[in-house]
Image (tube, coloured by chain):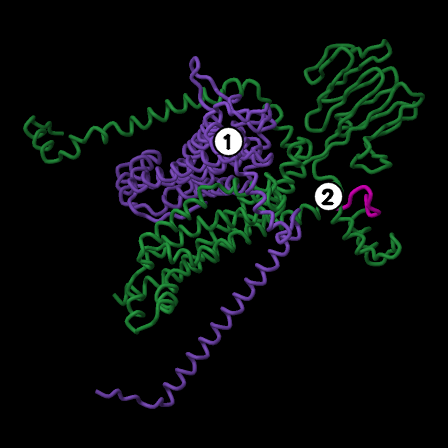
Amino acid sequence: MTLSVTAPSGATHQMADAWRRQTSLRRLYTAIGVGLLLVALGSTMWFADEANAGHFFDRLPHLLDFLSWLVPKDWNDVWRAMFDVASPHDTGTQEFNFPLGRAYVWGSFYIPEYFELMLTTLNVALVSTFIGFVFAVPFSFIAARNLTPHPVLRLIVKRFMELLRAFPEIVIAGLFAAIVSIGPIAAIIAIGLHSIGALGKLFYEINENIDMRAEEGLRAVGANWFERVRFAGLPQVLPNFMSYTLLRIEINVRISTIMGAVGGGGIGEELKLSISRGFGAKTIALVLLLFTTIFIVDQFSAWLRRKLVGEQAFVMGA
Amino acid sequence: MATMTADQIQSIEERFPQVFHRPFHKRFGPLLLLGGTFLYLLYALWFFNLPQVMRESHWERLPLFLTQWISYDVQPIFRLDEPQITAKYPRFSVLGPNPNPDWVKTNADGSVTILIDGTAKSITFNKTQATIIANGETVAVGLGTGKPLISGPVPGWITAHEDEVVADMGFAGEARVAVDRVRIRKRFLGWANFVFDTRSPFFGKSASEVASLIVSGPELKPGTSNLALAGDNIWNNAQWQHGDVWTKLLQTIVMAFLGTMLGGIVAFPLAFFAARNITPSRLVNQVLKRFFDFMRSIDMLIWALFFTRAFGPGPLAGSAAIFFTEIGTLGKTYSEALENIDDKPREGVTSTGANGLLVQRYGVLPEVVPVFISQTLYQWESNTRGATIIGAVGAGGIGLKLWEAMRTNSNWANVFYMVLLILLVVFIFDNISNFLRRRLSQTIHDYNRIQAEQG
């Protein structure tokens, strides 16, 4: 079999030409885009390097120095630090005063300091997610276009949630630290307020996509707003709400760790101290504990989410 | 309404067992969940010692702090134990080195009148007596007997201490009268010296005066044009530190941009090896996926602390922290997007005999690039917020500046200024990223539609 190729007649020739022009134009745009991106990357790198206390290439050889203090003299000290067991290397300095932080619960039974701190961080995350959930659910129904009781109310609630979401948590934490004293409560308020905004936005987007037939049915029998939301809205969206809330718990554990480092209590504070002073064993113990906790929380939440809504891709972050 | 017989009820129950005989965990699950949540909250109440914290908290400070966000005060002291009553302003008063405000009046008889809020809220005093007017009441305080004595009834807005009488005038301010001095706090709405600070030659001039000076005035500082001088004065305003704030803000933006971009660049090739439908080796998939989990689970905070130690505090440390976290986050989302692609374009390209790289380029990439970009933008947006927080632990940017301004509890106006800037940046970035993502989802949508139409 032979392939017959017809020589390009005028029309096809023109078409091929147009196509070639189009592709070359698109390639040009892509090249310009990539070029701009590279320039932006280069200049921002230079800017970041310029503004930093230590410069990248000067400090690069010292990256290993910083790893060297991390290696403890005795690897068993990592476990001793984690479980508050006295170390034979104890010379009275903060580096090895492991048993000092024991939280005695019952007689000689104690919770090791780091576990207690980790628990604080976890509890901050859980309570603030709870606050976020409790307020975000009603707000989300008010802010959803299809379920809102009043358009003006919808606009107000939407703007309010946007503000909560964009407001830097650290400022709320700092403000409340001056009122309720520095510690986990200020962190809970800050993360809780942020969670209201973040969850509320995700929730009302879910609400806007529900099947409205159930709501119409309830409206037909004269149900009021609360009843319509309760019996037509909520059953449809609750699994998705739960699944986003679980995702929020993951994020909040991370944020509450960071909040801890700036005075919000919990493991972050200890971690910051131990890294900045160069306590190898303590740092490794803390990082291990934090890493394991975050890993477990992530995996558990992923498993639960899969059970709730099946395999469904979720946008991270928010 | 007709009543049902037992038979009918039974038949309905038999027909719908899923409604009438639900398994235990479905019937009581929600109740148990609620009960569990309630118990957990009780535990949290005890764990955080909430009742005591609430008892010891100072909620009365909240309105005070909030008013400080948008106002400033001037606190002159008038000494009464010197030959002549003279006002003393704090050394770095917002009124400049030689204040002579029009709300302080020296009367003909040597007494001084201070209009804290017009004449309705004011205080007039000489060395022997002070007259405080506020809320429609006039209170005379005698100062001649060694301690301040109020003649007549004491109204609610005045607190009489042993050696001091405090008149609270609400937002407008307060007056504290003692035998040897009168201390005034007068509050103004707005931000003081936002443009020029008290050291600037432009200080205290109206906008039109400044404009005419810049356009045609004589050089205020020889050798520099007035425009350059004004710019320099604004940029280096000691009270508001515009230059520093804006530079730090830029650092925060750069941190988020650089970290997310580099993270994306590194995660991009790795994601292809982590996706199980693209790289058939289970071992490589699993190793890379666990690596992504590892990078993500080592929190951004830990990375930030490590890099602050390695590179010193600054945006480089922050960028590196975001970069390392983003490798994990973006790697995970990219590889999940790759695993969800439609296989047909890939098969088509493979069937033409294209090599591996070309198959990825023409069979896979067009499908995932919009998703990749959309997710990268999302992360960029969320990192802009995150960069503010990790800045506070020393990773550079505006976070540390914010934290320091807050720690003193006195600079709330500066804090609010920075918050407004951050809100502005977040707002702008949200909109850019939303706009781009909408455009992209249009592309994805079109692609899906064309695919659906072609079967």
Q: Taking the image as drawn, is residue A252 in sight?
A: yes
Return the residue at label 1.
A267
Q: Which amino acid does label 1 sit on?
A: Ile
SS at mark 2? loop
Q: Which color has been applied to chain B in this rendered view?
A: green
Q: Can you name the residue that lies furthest to the right here?
A: B83
Chain ID, mark 1: A
The magenta span reads B194-204
Of A199 and B123, nearer the camera is: A199
| Residue B198 is one of the magenta-drawn residues | yes
Q: Residue at x 60, y 50 (%)?
A: A61
Give residue B437's position: percent from left, percent from top: 45, 56
| Most frequent secondary structure within the magenta stretch | loop
The residue positioned 48% from the left and 32% from the top of the image is A78
**Which amino acid type corresponds to the residue marked 2 in the rendered image?**
Phe
The tint of chain A in the picture is purple
Picture coordinates of residue B386, whole percent (x, y) = 53, 44
Q: Does the magenta stretch include residue A24?
A: no
